[in-house]
Structure formats: structure tokens, C-alpha cells
Image (cartoon, grey):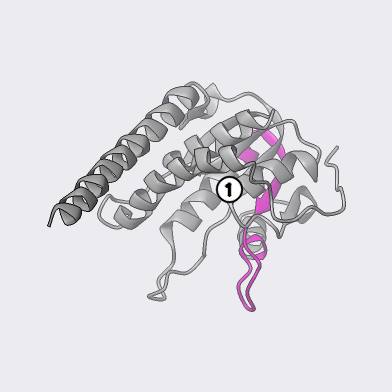
Amino acid sequence: MKRFKKILFAGLIFFGISVLFIFWANFKIENETEDKVTSELSELPNEKVGLLLGTSKILANGNPNPYFFNRIEATVQLYKSGKIKNIIVSGDNSRKHYNEPEDMKNELIRSGIPADKIYEDFAGFRTLDSVVRAKEIFGQKSYIIVSQQFHNERAVFLAQKNGIEAFGYNAKDVNQYAGFKTNVREKLARAKVFWDFLFGVEPKFGGERIEIK
């Protein structure tokens, strides 16, 4: 019985520390990026490149993914306002018949973005990969990231820690009920950021340099 109590006590301590760490990680990321992330075009500088972060076009239930289409809309606004001249579409292409960069590129073209202004990054499997590859593969040391605010904060933080001057343009979010799982997952992802720092995690793939000039 005493051993069980000790195990239970240790488990509660570990749980408490984990919760506190998650809260700290979220606070730190939000605090250090609040001046770099915005929903107002007028607050953004002009940059050569916008980095559009990928997500699935279609949900598991077959419905259109509002996160995807809201990001497309925000990217089109950014381009047509003259804030960016080129777009990197970065996402997952690891499964057959699943291609986030291609889906994003096609939707951008349908919205009037010239195809020759869109660069595909097929190895953006994680946010870390996307932001670092924009620098190492596409040669950009400063750019504007497009995603929802919660995602932009983490992406800008990762970019800053990798020597990149990044800004975030917030696409419209979805309602809290529909986005509940996504937001919970984001809280955990922010804690993992510091775990990756601790162990020096790097992008999974390199590749041939394709500098955007």
C-alpha cells in the first residue's frame, strides 16, 4: 500500500509539473511573438516571400477544411495587397493521393495568383521543417508566415530561434467548438517546441537549394 501511495504521489507531481510546463511554454511563445503576429495588413512590412503553412484540404468527414480555405484567402489578400511577391506553399506529401502543397498551389492559381510566383515545398512535414527550409532551401532570411493566429505564434517563434526575421499574418480562425481538438493539440505542440530545442531536432530532409530572388 505504501509503495502504491509513493507511485501515486510521484505520478501527481509529474502531472503537475507537466501542466505547469505546458502553461509556461504557451505563455512564452505568445509573449515573444505578440508584436510580430497580426490580422492587419497595414501592420506588416513588404517582404519578398510569404510562407503558407499546409493543412488538409478536406476533413475526415469529407467536408471542406475551413482552416485550409481561410489560409488561402489570407494569402491571396497578402499577395494582391503587394505585401509579398512570391509564395512558398509548404506541407505534407508523404502519402499517395495526399499532397498539401499541390492542393494549395491549385487553389491559389484559381484565385488569380500566377503559377510562376508559387514555389512548392513538399517536405514541410512539421512547422519546424517549413520555417527552416524556407531559409535553408529557398534562401529567405525574412518572410511573412500565413496560418491561423495560434499556429502563426508558434511558427514565428520557431523562425526567430533559427535566425529568421518572421512575421505572421493571421487567417480567419474557425469556431471554438469545431477547432477544439486543434487548439488542444496546439497547446501540446508548443511544449514540444522546447523538447525539440533540448535535443537539437532538425528538419527531416534537406534538398537542392532553390533560391527565390
- Tell me the residue at 72%/55% (across/down): 121
**Is 212 on the left-hand or right-hand side of 144?**
right
Name the one closer to the observer, 58 or 154.
154
Q: Is residue 209 above or below residue 178?
A: above
User: Looking at the picture, how far across and down is residue 61, in whole percent?
Assistant: 37, 75
Q: Secondary structure at mark 1?
A: helix
Q: What residue is disc 1 on?
A: 127
Name the one closer to the observer, 16 or 127.
16
Outermost residue to the left: 1
User: Looking at the picture, how far across and down is residue 25, in whole percent?
Assistant: 41, 34
- Tell me the residue at 69%/42% (across/down): 132
Q: Quadrant of the N terminus?
A: bottom left
- Tell whether position 111 is magenta: no
Please name the amino acid that badge 1 sits on: Thr
User: Looking at the picture, how far across and down is residue 190, in whole percent?
Assistant: 45, 41
- Tell me the residue at 20%/48% (across/down): 6
Name the one closer to the observer, 114 or 151.
151
Q: Which residues are magenta?
A: 76-102
